[in-house]
Image (tube, rainbow, N blue to C red):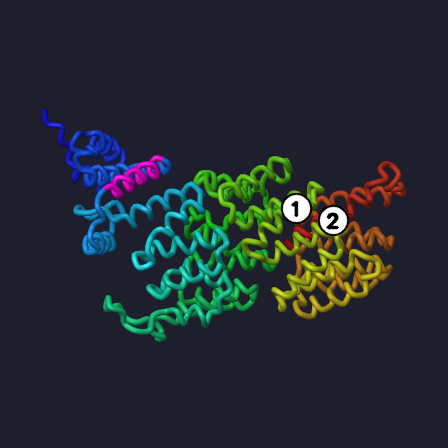
Amino acid sequence: MDHYVPKDQVTTLLDHGLFTSAQLLGGFLVSSSTGNSEASPQLKAESLVLLGDSFFKEKEYRRAIHTYKQALLHLKTILKPTTTTSRSSLSASNRSSSPSSFNNSAINENEVKFRIASSYCALNENRAALIEMEGIPSKAKTLQMSLMMGKLYRYTRHTRAAAACYKECLRQCPYIIEAIIALAELGLSAKDIISLFPQTPSRSARAPFDHLESSRWLQRYVEAQCCIASNDYKGGLELFSELLQRFPNNIHILLEMAKVEAIIGKIDEAIMNFEKVRSIDPYVVAYMDEYALLLKTKSDQLKLNKLVHDLLNIDPTRPEVFVALSVLWERKDDRGALSYAEKSIRIDERHVPGYIVKGNLLLSMNRPDAAAIAFRGAQDLRADLRSYQGLVRSYLALSKIKEALHAAREAMKAMPQSAKALKLVGDVHASSTTGREKAKKFYESALRLEPGYLGAALALAELHVMEGRNGDAVSLLERYLKDWADDSLHVKLAQVFAATNMLQDALLHYQAALRINPQNEAAKKGLERLEKQMKGVDPDAPEEDEENDVEDVDGDVEETELL
């Protein structure tokens, strides 16, 4: 009775994408007498690789790793093939577009190791993946392998080795945008990155990457990413805007712009760009958690609900979806929101917004120690303005003035042209009575640098009130009224008017705040107090803590506006 199982049929099934059938037939192949390791270890190894491929394609990564490793063990029992054989199999593998195709005459051991590493990556076991990849000789590494090595070195904090891998990628092909972004984030200058692009024709007769019009956009793109990575948000936005004119409706550029606008507080512009992206492609998930944060800032519960509903339908396994869920739940249940933020980090421990949202939640739950750890987690990955702001708030809540000042100064060093970084230093000084004069200078500097920066104006007004200069506070805030329809601005004015006993003016501003944002808690509570005052009732009589509550909530509103 013939027990022959055709190996080439497993390959055919794999090539046609029929992975379950390939897996079932592969099981027969591996267990057949012809695939017996004593009879032919070479055939057994090849059969195991094909079975491993079927597991890999079906995302059964543990089974794939186990099967590939068995194949490599059988390979070791065979006498080492001559270098020519391994060379020819390597070039065959490079030629092959399908990753499941192996040279029929020999197994490409490096390709098998790469697939073991890819499986480990899919399981988030980066160190194990790196060990496999380091077993591949550098001359045998393909572009795909170099890119994966760069990512793995970066994940395991081997920064220099990561940069070397990404550079190698760009020397071979300047259009690997992932490598450009990674090198920008690793601190390379635009000039250094552009100098990697091949200038002379290679052996493959590929045309050189010249500095003509065709490549100019890519150089602009490199410059934009380097600006963003070095916190020059304004410069980055200008370059992205220029690129957008050449590539209208480019989703990647629109998302990059929206993300930066969100960070620097251009809330309306960012929302507009996110909405534009969703109108072009309603199934985008990237950066949608940043959009959710903006909708929360605007208290647009309806849009936030719809966004989260859409994201859950698109792909409920992505970290962005859980950050958006956390943002949605924050109003209902802090603990539920926190568990969603933590789930986003478990899915992808490199997802910065997960840490930012977690830190802000912990602060609102009065757990500044844990919040500081979350913000430091965000900073280790990519220090942006929000992680600095979070760290400063955490340290101030812990009365660690020295650490808060250090974090604020770090922000100023990282972002010398940022009014928000200047305000952060001011916030630290304002926290102590002796530092108010210094705080005033920093707030004024921030406003000189960015006259439209409402956060600094609100903080300076608060300082005026503390020092009893209510008139100065009012005149400063009223300058912003014509340009800003902002609820926190009206709340601050209402509070100053109420403190100065100008109750009618206070009433108008609380009402204006609630028209803009009916959910503004500070306005609701302030209005309640004001009505009691207007009736001649002592607002503090029923609950002594009420006044503090108003101030605390206002602090949250103010910070939300800044973040």
Q: Which mark is residue 152?
A: none
Q: Residue type at mark 2?
A: Ala
Residue shown at the point (48%, 63%) measured from the top left: 184
Query: Which residue is at 53% across, 56% downward?
Result: 259
Report how far apart the C-alphas of labels 1 and 2 lie in the structure.
Answer: 10 Å
The residue to which callout 2 is attached is 397
Q: Position of residue 480 (x, y in %)?
A: 70, 62
Q: Is residue 293 above or below residue 165?
A: above
Q: Is residue 5 visible?
A: yes
Residue occupying the point 47% across, 54% down: 154
C-beta proximity under 8 Å, tags 1 and 2: yes
Residue 3 in percent (x, y) is at: 13, 28
Number of other residues with Cα within 10 Å of mark 2, as a class: few under 14, some 14 to 19, many 20 or more: some
Q: Is residue 63 left or right of residue 255?
A: left
The image shows residue 340 at horizontal and vertical percentages of 56, 38
Q: Which residues are magenta?
A: 63-77
Image quarter of residue 264: bottom right
* Residue at 76 percent of width and 61 percent of height: 460
Q: Which residue is mark 1?
A: 371
Is residue 2 part of the magenta span, yes or no? Answer: no
Q: Does the stretch in magenta take in 76? A: yes
Kind of residue sitting beneath label 1: Ala
Residue 508, percent from left and from top: 76, 52
Judge left or right: residue 41 versus residue 365.
left
Mark positioned earlier in the residue sequence (1 or 2): 1
Q: Nearer the viewer, residue 404 or 259?
A: 404
Which SS does the magenta portion mostly show?
helix
Which element carries disc 1, helix, strand or loop? helix
